[in-house]
């Protein structure tokens, strides 16, 4: 996406639509500064454990029943996402939710889509909740209108959140799939178990027998069955094993030792390209999630040399499917999950790696808890400065990020790593492209077409802006669509001779309402692979929610921001 952004920037300059100086000035655009600074502040809150009390609150209120667990998880996530960027919030809560899923024997697939949706809904409550709000506000201000206030969108955002959470608790949870995760044990499993790989050799006594026989004889769980290029995850218990099958099993040390009793079933001494360097008695299985913006995105697995740091990678899960063939040559994408063996030392090493999210309790990564009050104070100061109009949002956010570093909440290197430069470069290109739409007159033509096709009726124009923004957001990224559609909304409002607020708010809420695909919003991408979801899961659960949000927008936006003549 960073390449797309830079190419868009170059294209509008070379086409003569935007002056070079103006195009390069987008690198210092207030929206870019604000979003980058908020990412640094989110990292500071994470590194100091400032969100730890929310995690403890969630754990304390979770009695193990599905509905209370879902309610408190969604509520806490939405509250945090109102002030902290969505993606870092989900990255912080994801391992915690997986841990709770394992503790209460709830499939992660029942929790992770609601986790993502709750963060999206909570982000519509304040200006700081998501980059979409900031971009719409800054583009509006560039056209000479007042920027959006930090709590201006709260009435509709709070209604969005309340309606969305009610839907998830009453109806959405019934549409969620129930799929097991390699990282979350089944009910009755002991927490201290190990993973290894075995092969069914020629003449094995287990050939032709069902998988459940092997599980019963070893008192172990078969996680994956690999047959040539086919991979069954998890394999059906009635599936009959064949000679040449490879099985990934999870069990106690005694279970693994019991392989000696089975003829022709042997531990494989080699996994992938290297030998297993760990004693099976200390070997455990972990999942390393690749978050959006990670420096490993776009790199091959073998380039990471993880076996020297965090164990041996044996598979990669992508979009709910486990990829193993030539895994060392796979190019990593956001949302990929690396499946790795490791001992206690290597797992501790993995917990400190910035490139991944380890799917277990993240509070062990917190390195400076005594700075947590300072981090919260800095966040409160930034919110107060923006709310009272003391500082513009970009200046307040930059001051907050700087205070996080100077206050010792995180160091300079961690601050640079916290910034998702790929997203920022994409936004620079989108801002330049949005400017070209105005200069070329295309935004005016699009707005004129929209007004003409709706008969000039304001509510229908708002509906058209919402639906167009939703469709584009599901295909591309919400930030870029916000930049491109806001000028169209402003032009449509001017064409009707009405105040601009209801029209830009339609774009703002539509660009945040990304529930139909795992690619429109980064939080959806984060939970896609680790939850074992399929593309249709998002559409099935998200379509009713999208319809409710559309109806709510049509009812509340004109009520909060009436259609007033200029």
Image (cartoon, grey):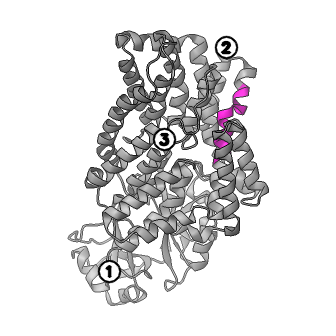
**Spot occupied by residue 239 in the image (x, y as percentages of width and height):** 22, 68
Indicate the quadrant where residue 182 lies: bottom left
* Residues under numbered marks 1 and 2 in contact, where contact means CB atoms less than 8 Å apart: no
Could you give the CA–CA distance between mark 1 and mark 3, rounded to whole angstroms? 40 Å
- Marked residue nearer the N-terminal end (3 or 2): 2
Indicate the quadrant where residue 480 lies: top right
The residue at the far right in this view is 406
Q: Residues within 10 Å of mark 1 (few under 14, many from 20)?
A: few
Residue 68 falls left or right of residue 143:
left
- Marked residue nearer the N-terminal end (1 or 3): 3
Q: Mark 1 or mark 3, which is nearer to you?
A: 3
| Residue tagged 2 | 16
- Residue at 73% over, 39% down: 395
Helix, strand or loop under label 1: loop
Tell me if residue 412 can be seen: no
Indicate the quadrant where residue 559 lies: top left
Q: Mark 3 or mark 2, which is nearer to you?
A: 3
Q: Main secondary structure of the magenta part?
A: helix
Could you give the CA–CA distance between mark 3 and mark 2, rounded to whole angstroms? 36 Å
Helix, strand or loop under label 2: loop
Q: Is residue 249 above or below residue 518?
A: below
**Spot occupied by residue 539 in the image (x, y as percentages of width and height):** 32, 43
Give whichever of 114, 520 is nearer the camera.
Answer: 114
Residue extent of the magenta highlight: 24-38
| Residue tagged 1 | 188
| Residue tagged 3 | 124
Give whichever of 242, 92 is nearer the camera.
Answer: 92
Tell me if residue 436 can be seen: yes
Q: Mark 1 or mark 2, which is nearer to you?
A: 1
């Amino acid at each position: 996406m960073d390449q797309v952004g830079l190419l868009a920037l170059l294209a509008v300059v070379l086409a003569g639509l935007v002056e070079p100086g103006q195009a390069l000035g987008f690198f210092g655009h207030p929206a870019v500064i604000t979003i980058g600074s908020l990412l640094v502040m989110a990292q500071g809150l994470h590194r100091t454990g400032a969100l730890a009390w929310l995690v403890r609150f969630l754990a304390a209120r979770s009695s193990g029943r599905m509905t209370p667990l879902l309610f408190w998880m969604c509520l806490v996530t939405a509250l945090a996402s109102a002030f902290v960027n969505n993606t870092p919030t989900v990255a912080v809560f994801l391992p915690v939710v997986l841990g709770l899923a394992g503790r209460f024997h709830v499939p992660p697939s029942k929790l992770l889509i609601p986790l993502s949706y709750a963060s999206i809904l909570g982000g519509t409550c304040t200006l700081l909740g998501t980059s979409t709000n900031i971009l719409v506000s800054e583009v509006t201000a560039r056209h000479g209108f007042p920027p959006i206030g930090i709590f201006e969108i709260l009435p509709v955002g709070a209604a969005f959140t309340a309606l969305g959470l009610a839907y998830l608790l009453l109806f959405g949870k019934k549409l969620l799939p129930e799929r097991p995760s390699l990282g979350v044990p089944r009910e009755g499993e002991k927490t201290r178990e190990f993973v290894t790989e075995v092969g069914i050799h020629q003449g094995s006594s287990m050939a032709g027998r069902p998988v459940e026989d092997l599980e019963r004889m070893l008192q172990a769980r078969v996680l994956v069955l690999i047959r040539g290029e086919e991979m069954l995850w998890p394999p059906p218990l009635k599936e009959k094993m064949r000679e040449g099958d490879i099985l990934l099993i999870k069990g106690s040390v005694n279970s693994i030792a019991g392989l000696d009793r089975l003829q022709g079933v042997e531990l494989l001494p080699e996994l992938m390209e290297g030998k297993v360097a760990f004693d099976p008695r200390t070997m455990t299985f972990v999942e390393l999630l690749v978050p959006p913006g990670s420096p490993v995105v776009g790199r091959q697995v073998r380039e990471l040399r993880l076996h020297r740091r965090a164990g041996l990678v044996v598979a990669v899960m992508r979009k709910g499917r486990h990829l193993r063939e030539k895994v060392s040559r796979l190019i990593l994408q956001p949302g990929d999950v690396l499946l790795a063996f490791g001992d206690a030392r290597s797992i501790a090493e993995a917990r400190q790696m910035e490139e991944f999210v380890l799917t277990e309790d993240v509070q062990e990564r917190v390195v400076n808890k005594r700075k947590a009050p300072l981090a919260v104070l800095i966040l409160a100061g930034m919110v107060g400065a923006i709310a009272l109009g003391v500082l513009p949002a970009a200046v307040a956010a930059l001051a907050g990020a700087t205070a996080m570093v100077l206050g010792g909440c995180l160091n300079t290197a961690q601050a640079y790593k916290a910034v998702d430069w790929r997203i920022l470069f994409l936004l620079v290109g989108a801002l330049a492209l949005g400017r070209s739409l105005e200069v070329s007159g295309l935004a005016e033509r699009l707005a004129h077409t929209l007004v003409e096709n709706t008969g000039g009726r304001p509510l229908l124009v708002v509906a058209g802006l919402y639906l167009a923004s939703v469709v584009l957001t599901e295909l591309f990224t919400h930030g870029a669509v916000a930049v491109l559609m806001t000028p169209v909304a402003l032009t449509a409002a001017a064409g009707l001779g009405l105040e601009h607020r209801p029209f830009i708010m339609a774009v703002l809420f539509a660009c945040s309402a990304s529930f139909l695909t795992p690619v429109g919003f980064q939080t959806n991408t984060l939970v896609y692979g680790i939850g074992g979801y399929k593309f249709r899961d998002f559409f099935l659960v998200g379509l009713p929610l999208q319809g409710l949000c559309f109806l709510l927008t049509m009812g509340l936006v004109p009520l909060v921001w009436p259609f007033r003549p200029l």
